[in-house]
Amino acid sequence: MEEICNKCGLPKNLCVCQDIAKESQKIKIRWDARRFGKVVTSIRGLEKDVDLEALTKELKRNLACGGTIKGNEIILQGKHVKKVKEILMKQGFKEELIDAQDR
Ligand SMILES: [Zn+2]
């Protein structure tokens, strides 16, 4: 008997659940000037099953900056859009799903 995905009910070879999950893991990286000229970089779109604390730690370590988690959003101090994208790709996120705007 063919194996059936218990999420979508389709045979495993036709199942698109994983693709859909990856699609929803679209990440947005933006920078923003806050009050008093303070610049922050925000990373949005990460799902709950991503270990945000570990990822934030990794980002802070690589960028040598401060950062916090606010809900599902990671906020880093300073402008790091390109570097954040590189780090996320090293962490296994797909380049085409990372929407980075460096302006
Ligand atoms: Zn499925």
Image: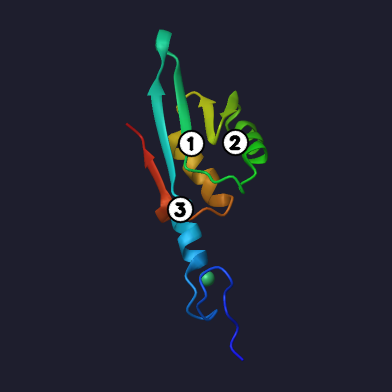
Residue at mark 2: C-beta within 8 A of ligand 1: no
From this viewpoint, is residue 65 visible?
Answer: no
Placement of the N terminus among the 4 image quadrants? bottom right
Question: Is the residue at mark 3 in contact range of ligand 1, meaning its CB lies under 8 Å from it?
Answer: no
- Using the image as rendered, state which of residue 79 and residue 97 is in the foreground: 97
Q: Quadrant of the C terminus?
A: top left
**Circle 3 — which element?**
helix
SS class, disc 1:
strand
To which residue does mark 2 refer? 59
Packing grade of label 1 (10 A; few <14, some 14-19, many >=20) is many
Q: Earlier in the sequence, mark 1 or mark 3?
A: 3
Name the residue: 43% across, 37% down: 29
Q: Are marks 2 and 1 in contact (CB under 8 Å)?
A: yes
Q: Residue furthest bottom?
A: 1
Q: Which residue is mark 3?
A: 24
> What percent of the width, then of the height, locates residue 76?
53, 27
